[in-house]
Image (cartoon, rainbow, N blue to C red):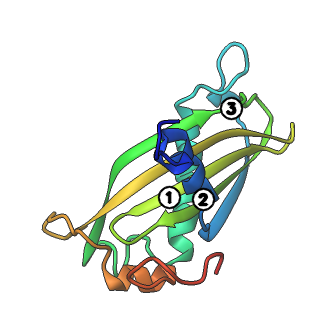
Amino acid sequence: MALGQTASDRPEGRAASRRRGPRIRPASVELEVPFHDVDALRIVWHGHYYKYLELARTRLVRQCGLEVGDLIGPRYRFLMIESGCRYAAPLRYGDRVRVDAWFQDVAHRLNIGYEVINLTRGERAARAHTVLATTDVEGRLLLRTPDAILERIGVDADGRGEPGR
């Protein structure tokens, strides 16, 4: 570590501190790995993890009332601007899986964290994140998350509120 550099200045320190931050409005889905998601070795192809993340993200935004409807669609839109997944252990055909999703940061964009847990083997299979930017209906990027969206998530303009609400 360089002189004057803290653990949070290193990339691995920033990532670790993000993961340890509050889990705002957590949501989970459980599923069984279907045969059509695996290869000849019966291991899930890496791209299918994003499908599992999408199931958890959908649960998360629905529980906040942020699905396409009266607010999202007529007034605002979400754009996926970033995604990443770090694989820790393979998922296999028939494994029971839980995908946890939560808001990590909401002030300027919706940063959603995920953890994929293999319930069959009792181990973490992956950690991931996606970032959603908000636009108005004309497609103009909003530099702060609108208050109406923050209210539905249950946080204030600084992203503080009731984690786990």
Relative to residue 78, is residue 154 drawn left or right? right
Residue 26 position by quadrant: bottom right
Task: Tell me: 99 left or right of 102.
Answer: right
Earlier in the chain: of badge 1 and badge 3, it is 3
Nearer the observer, 51 or 9: 9
The image position of residue 108, as x and y in percent, is 33, 68
Which residue is located at x 75 percent, y 28 percent?
Answer: 92
Q: Quadrant of the C terminus?
A: bottom right
User: Residue 46 occupies which quadrant of the picture?
Assistant: top right
Residue 143 is drawn in which quadrant? bottom left
Q: Nearer the viewer, residue 88 or 55?
A: 88
**Distance from the alpha carbon under mark 2 to that under mark 3:** 17 Å
Around disc 1, counting alpha carbons within 10 Å, would you say few (fewer than 14), some (14 to 19), or many (20 or more)?
many
Q: Residue furthest right?
A: 121
Label 2, label 1: how many angstroms apart (C-alpha)? Answer: 7 Å
Gap in Å between the C-alphas at discs 1 and 3? Answer: 19 Å
Say which element carries label 2: strand
Which residue reaches farthest top? 40
Q: Nearer the viewer, residue 10 or 101?
A: 10
Which badge, 2 or 3, is on the more N-terminal residue? 3
Disc 1 residue type (three-letter):
Ile
Question: Quick check: marks 2 and 1 in contact, CB under 8 Å?
Answer: yes
In this image, 69 relative to 137: left or right? right
Q: Residues within 10 Å of mark 3 (few under 14, many from 20)?
A: few
Q: Which residue is mark 1?
A: 112
Q: Is residue 44 above or below residue 25?
A: above
Residue visible at 54% across and 83% down? 161
Q: Which residue is mark 3?
A: 88
At label 3, which amino acid type do we have?
A: Ala
> Which residue is disc 2 drawn over?
101
Q: Is residue 70 visible?
A: no
